[in-house]
Amino acid sequence: MGRAFERRKASIFKTAAQNSKLYAKYSKQLYVAAKNGVPDPAANPVLRSLVEKAKKENVPSHVIDKAIQKAAGKGGEDFLSVRYEGFGPGGALIIVECLTDNNVRTVAEIRSYFVRAGAKLAASGSVVMSFDHLAVISFKGEGEEKVIEALFAADVAVEDVESKDGVITVFTPPAEFYKAKTAVLEAMPGVELDVQEITFLPQATKTLGAEELTTFEKFLQMLEENDDVQEVYHNIVLP
């Protein structure tokens, strides 16, 4: 079988590990969304949006259903949403969002990643102020005027609407996400949303040198391999 087989085997194992991480991430998010609201996507817009996003990333239906059914039962885990901020390699600005059932364990692990990368955690609010917290909805299409009119008619507080290379992107405050999404879907029947998320966008980006970039990418990998880490935001331009 030789080297070709070994390479394919390594690729299969790597893909399986990536899928396992993705499924675990969505299982936890779906569980929390269902537990904190109603375990029915039709009646819970937060859960419905997560289900749509999970399906778009090819998370199997049985993984989605199991997480929702688990939340519908009595008891279960009590997850806490925690945000860490810090300065990474090369002065990178970092925001790490976690869902954890043991904050003592999670903060110790996150701190260890920062220390190993020669980085440091920062006080809450010291990094997030350099990012814009926004809801982002993006889709292929033309006619941004029609979209703007629909948003205004739905009384959505719009931060910005961009149209570039056949793609329209809507930016709104996080609280307006579901109202904006509904307005877009009603104004553009049949449109497929390529992006529908609440995120942190850096107000300014930074480019690192080769050595710092290598350290930064290893740092990101450590964070992303942690099951408690849900999202990592930063201001570094990646190749």
Image (spheres, rainbow, N blue to C red):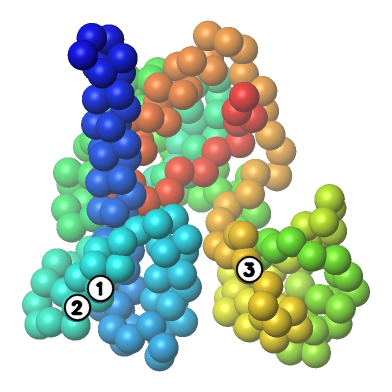
Q: Quadrant of the N terminus?
A: top left
Residue 33 in view here? yes
Residue 222, quarter of picture: top left
Q: Quadrant of the C terminus?
A: top right
Residue 51 is situated, as x and y percent measured from the top left of the image, at: 40, 70
Q: Write the residue at 42% across / 31% down.
A: 220
Q: Amino acid at mark 3?
A: Glu
Q: Residues within 10 Å of mark 1 (few under 14, many from 20)?
A: some
Q: Amino acid at mark 2?
A: Gln
Residue located beneath label 1 in the image: 65
Q: Secondary structure at mark 1?
A: helix
Q: Residues within 10 Å of mark 2 (few under 14, many from 20)?
A: some
- Mark number, residue 69: 2
From the viewer's perspective, is 160 left or right of 192? right
Q: Amino acid at mark 1?
A: Asp
Labelled pair 1, 2 in contact (Cβ < 8 Å): yes
